[in-house]
Amino acid sequence: MIELTDALYEVGADGVATITLNRPEQRNALGAPMLRDLTAALASARDDIAVRAVVLTGAGDKAFCAGADLAGFAAQASEVQRHIERGGFVELFVACERLGKPLIGCINGHALAGGFGLALCCDLLVAADTATFGTPEIKVGVWPMMITSIVTRNLGRKRAMELFMTGERIDAATALAWGFVNRVVPASEVRERAHAWAAEIAGWSPLIMRLGRDAFYATDSLDYETALHYLQAQLTVVSMTEDFREGVAAFLEKRAPKFRGR
């Protein structure tokens, strides 16, 4: 088991790992230690073959994550040192994309600023009906630089600019209508429902899940024709796996497939 200070990490018998931002008294704000812990936890989940899906959530019932812990980034440090520490956000966001396994965000409360960006790094989002989302940075003279690309890719240009320029929060129902939250559930059920969904997804082929998830993100920055050729090649790779053959055989034989991750 890895040793963490600002996050919790546990793996269940169902193959679902749960990573919890664990600073509820600070609304799970992202300081340098938290960034390191989350990145380390994701690396452990990535490398553990027993883990087939990951749930990311926050401790307490008020906030998933309120954003960067401004007080936690050494106030007396030089601007160069603060610039280096902010690199922890880059490492964390990249670690989410390169996890190679389904990442389900369990949004148990407010997801604001950098916390909003972290939520959007998840593949799927299950939100409590009490959750809110937003980028309030403009109200204190800051622009959400570290998450601009993440928000724009998930919400589109106009929705993203609306949040960036107004600093307003939107509720879970609006987030669902805008399309960046997948499911909204009662706050009392959000952890259970997120875990159940992760366990269901964990039952599919981990190899095909990784190949498909990696292809999804790899084509983000490719032009249309290049993306099509890349995906054609990846489909050939998928069709060469044992799990592909097992899935087809199970379908034809009208039985549940037995995926082995090969």
Image: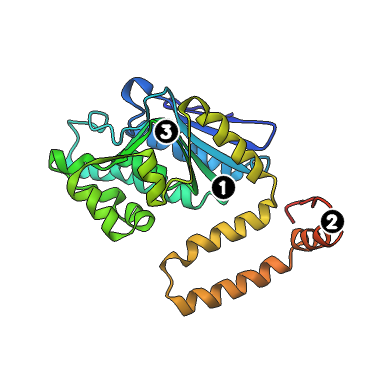
Residue 88 is at least partly visible in this image: no
- Residue at image location 45% in from the left, 76% down from the top: 224
Q: For this view, does 149 lie left or right of residue 61? A: left
Residue furthest to the top in view is 25
Q: For this view, does 70 lie left or right of residue 216? A: left
Q: Report which residue position mark 2 lands on.
A: 254
- Residue at image location 31% in from the left, 33% down from the top: 66
Q: Report which residue position mark 1 lands on.
A: 102
- Residue at image location 26% in from the left, 58% down from the top: 158
Q: 139 above or below 242?
A: above
Spatial CA distance of label 1 from label 2 is 26 Å
Q: Which mark is residue 129?
A: 3
Secondary structure of the residue carrying tag 1 is: loop
Name which residue type carries label 2. Lys
Where is residue 127, by image quadrant? Answer: top left
Question: Closest to the observer: 156 or 74?
Answer: 156
Name which residue type carries label 1. Pro
Residue 209 at x, y percent in the picture: 63, 54
| Comes first in the chain, label 2 or label 3 | 3
| Comes first in the chain, label 3 or label 1 | 1
